[in-house]
Structure formats: structure tokens, C-alpha cells
Image (tube, grey):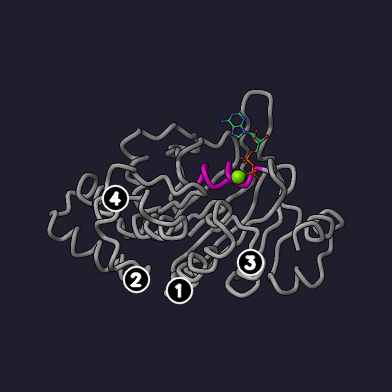
Amino acid sequence: MVRADRVCKNFGALQVLKGITLEVKRGEVLCLIGPSGSGKSTFLRCINHLEQVNAGRLYVDGDLVGYREKNGKLYEMSPRDAARQRRDIGMVFQHFNLFPHRTALENIIEAPTRVKNLKRADAVARARELLDRVGLADKADAYPAQLSGGQQQRVAIARALAMDPKLMLFDEPTSALDPELVGEVLGVMRELAASGMTMVVVTHEMGFAREVADQLVFMDGGVVVEAGNPREMLANPRHDRTKAFLSRIL
Ligand code: ADP
Ligand code: MG
């Protein structure tokens, strides 16, 4: 579902991704960890067309991201083609990013009605199903400010799912939450993983990574330092940098 082959990204002279190679198979969950500034968000943003890679190749579901290839040469993709690719990818951010002047339900139906031209009644029915799935059936008419952080994040997950993505990206989805609210969001993500969704999750919730992830990837300084089975890697990190990082967060 995702294949990164020596992906590089720089901002001017600052090299942020220095050749990321990894693969996420359909139905797999990959957890990405690493110190602040190591390029985790940038990597997710490249997958989701919020940044353009400078070198290397990035594929989602077999399609090159952001470029089209012709006779071995790469050309920048048209905004329209990029938008079409992006539609299949859901992203959940640390700070929820819900529309503050819209109810939970309105937040969820916005993209399906505007981007997919779904009929309002159909979008509403689907939104109610999704709210039920994230445990918020009774909050359809609440505004974000009336919801806890955990509830807002669950609405944000429902909103992403409303587009029927084939891939979900999570960028530190529980980092802004009070500790007692983390579990409800991880619970929803756990169920989503169990339902077969392909997920790339930047998180420092090691319990979640251990139990849910198929792969754990440790990034530092724009490179993958170590990757593998989460249980093995957490029990037995091979690289000093991984050991040092894990000892700081565990
Ligand atoms: P992480 O998510 O691992 O904390 P980021 O991907 O957010 O790391 O950032 C990696 C590096 O890239 C940081 O040094 C950050 O300042 C830099 N960076 C991120 N986005 C931009 C940008 N749009 N312009 C310039 N520098 C950026
Ligand atoms: Mg980040």
C-alpha cells in the first residue's frame, strides 16, 4: 500500500529526509517513532501530498505520489491528479483540526458532499454510522468546543473515514490529549486496525505499538535507524540510538 524507495526531502539547504526506504503492506499497521525533528511528520506529509519529495520514489497502492513517469522521466503531477490520489488517504493530526463552527456531523459530511458529490442524506446516514463506530452516536449536533479532546479526535477519525480511504495516516494523534483521554482514541484506532485498515501511525504510545503494529520503525536525523517486529525491537533494540531513545520514552 505504501512503498518508499530512498525518499529525500529538503527545505532549502535543510535535508530532512535522507533516503527513507520502507514498505507497508495492505492491512498492515506501521508505527513510526523517533525524536522531535527527525522527519516523521514530513514523511507523512509527503505521502499525503502536503509536501513534494525531492528525490527517490514514493508509491501509494502502486501509484507514484506527486509525479507521473513518462519514458523514464518524472513530471510533476497536475493538481487535479494529486487531489484524486489524496482523496483515498485519510489523515489525522495532533490538533484535530475540526471546523469550529460546524457540528460533529457537519464536519464529517463536508468532504463527502463537497469532494465526492455524495447526496446529503446519504452522507448524513454514513456520518451517523461512523459516529456510532467511534462511540459518539449522541454527539452528532455538538460543536467541537463542546467536546473533550478525546471526543474531538474521534470525530476527526470519523471524518477521515467518511471518505472511505484505503490508507490512514496518524500524526501523534494522542499527544495533545490529557492522559485519561488517550485510551479512548487508541481504542478506536485499535478497532480500525482490527478491521483491516492499512495505517501509518506516528506515536510514542509504545503499548499500542507493541500490541497493534506489524512493524516498528525508528527514525532519527532523516534516516531509518532500525525497523522490525515491535515486540522484538522493544525488547532488544540493536542500535545505540534506538536504545537511547527508548530509554528516554519508556
Ligand atoms: P518530526 O515530526 O519528527 O518532529 P518534522 O518532520 O516536523 O519532524 O521536521 C523535521 C525537520 O524539518 C525539522 O527540523 C523542521 O524544523 C523542518 N521542517 C519541517 N517542515 C518545514 C518547512 N515547511 N520548512 C522548513 N523546515 C521544515
Ligand atoms: Mg511531527
Determine whether, in the image, residue 200 is placed left or right of residue 112.
right
Which mark is drawn over residue 226? none
* Residue 43 on the magenta segment: yes
**Secondary structure beneath label 1:** helix
Q: Residue at x 45, y 74 (%)?
A: 191
Residue tagged 4: 107
Please say if the residues under marks 3 and 4 sit with CB atoms less than 8 Å apart.
Answer: no
Residue identified by numbered label 2: 133
Pointer 3 or 4: first along the chain: 4
Viewer-nearest of discs 3 and 4: 4
Q: CA distance from mark 2 to mark 4?
A: 16 Å
Segment tinted magenta in the rendering: 39-47
Do the CB atoms of the residues marked 1 and 4 lie less than 8 Å apart? no
Asked if marks 1 and 3 touch (Cβ < 8 Å), the reply is: no
Viewer-side label of 3, 2: 2
Query: Label 1 is placed on what type of residue?
Result: Glu
Which amino acid is tagged 3? Gln
Residue 24 shows in this picture:
yes
Residue located beneath label 3 in the image: 215
